[in-house]
Image (cartoon, rainbow, N blue to C red):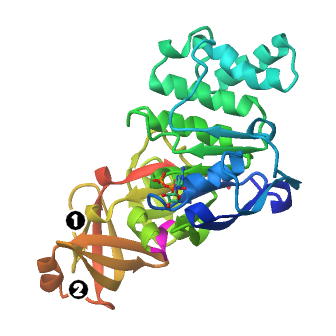
Amino acid sequence: MTPRAVADGLVCDIRVDSRDVEVRLEVAAGETVALLGPNGAGKSTVLGAVAGLVTPTAGGVTVAGRALAGTPPHRRRVALLAQEPLLFPHLSALDNVAFGPRSGGASRRDARAVARTWLDQVGVAELADRRPSQLSGGQAQRVAVARAVAAEPEVLLLDEPMAALDVDVAPAIRQVLRTVLADRTVVIVTHDVLDALLLADRVVVLDGGRIVEQGPTREVLSSPRSAFAARIAGLNLVPGVWDGGAVTHPDAVVTGLAADPAPVAGEDAVAVFSPSAVAVHRDAGSGSPRTSLVALVTDVEPMGDRVRVRTRVGEIPIAADVTPSAVADLDLAPGARVHLAVKAVEVAVHAARRS
Ligand SMILES: Nc1ncnc2c1ncn2[C@@H]1O[C@H](COP(=O)(O)OP(=O)(O)OP(=O)(O)O)[C@@H](O)[C@H]1O
């Protein structure tokens, strides 16, 4: 995907005095931006302003060069997918999805044909005749995704789309979104680092109604500069090529298990593991299938009852959480050379976002 110009995408340059929010968010056409931040940071306010549900005190929103001031929500060509699917209860899944194209002027027959295509695309073609009350949460959210894109919006807004779903259906919906979001102009609000990693080209972090950090997703998550990004990031990420058993990067080879959905051998992937899964030794270890990496300690930072040891393996930052006594026993300090061990079962390998 090659993001096109911001002029063809979204500019949300707003001040909302009643909520102390002042943000200039730019999203290029075809780009997916993840909006992160603590509760009350202003994420919903930004989505609301773009959708036309919040009126800014000053500034405004443009989509593909069109200023949207005074344009009501349903004429903005902006679709909002919320946590809850919010389908029309009295319409079938098919007619829920056909609603957008129909409102856009398509004949009933054409609108239904478009709706069928989208229901098929999100994997629920066989549920076309069901009412929302006859769908599971995950099925209803798939229908809601189909409904949002069938209206051919110029901007798609997703407000924590996986938050209300059971953890076991979230990966499948995430996979649907990966396909559907490609090449669209999207803002996704999420608290889940995996959503940002797997769905977004770029991350924008809000705090106290202001943008405090932004950049390419992997950069922000691996070297966070704001306190919030550091808190949610926390995870170790090693990008490389998946060979079915390990992810190979010029600086490190990390053995892991394919996540659901599985990456394809020979393609770009990212190994994800938590700092608590990393053991620190002074000598190379051996034993069960594991990754062993030679690292240089860059920082040692107490975090509650654990100590976060930040290291670099070549160019790759890797954090390990150890006990204070391990820090003393191993004499861990910036500049120390250590061996990091990570068990394969602790490493989830995800297909990298195509960019
Ligand atoms: N309807 C409202 N009326 C007045 N102030 C509001 C309203 N909704 C939110 N606020 C305030 O606006 C600020 C930004 O809130 P917003 O809901 O945009 O944050 P958020 O990042 O979406 O938070 P969360 O993650 O909790 O959903 C906060 O100070 C909040 O208290």
For the image, the number of numbered tags is 2
Q: Which residue is mark 2?
A: 332
Residue 82 visible (yes or no): yes
- Give the residue displayed 45% in from the left and 41% down from the top: 163
- Image-based side of 341 in relation to 117, left or right: left
Q: Position of residue 107 (x, y in %)?
A: 87, 14
Q: Secondary structure at mark 1?
A: loop
Q: Residue 91 in magenta?
A: no
Q: CA distance from mark 2 to mark 1?
A: 21 Å
- Image-based side of 232 in relation to 199, left or right: left
Q: Which residue is mark 1?
A: 286
Classed neighbour count for the residue bearing mark 1: other residues with Cα under 10 Å, few (<14), some (14–19), many (≥20): few
Q: Secondary structure at mark 2?
A: loop
Residue 352 visible (yes or no): no
Q: Position of residue 314 (x, y in %)?
A: 46, 79
Question: Start and end of the magenta stretch?
Answer: 221-226
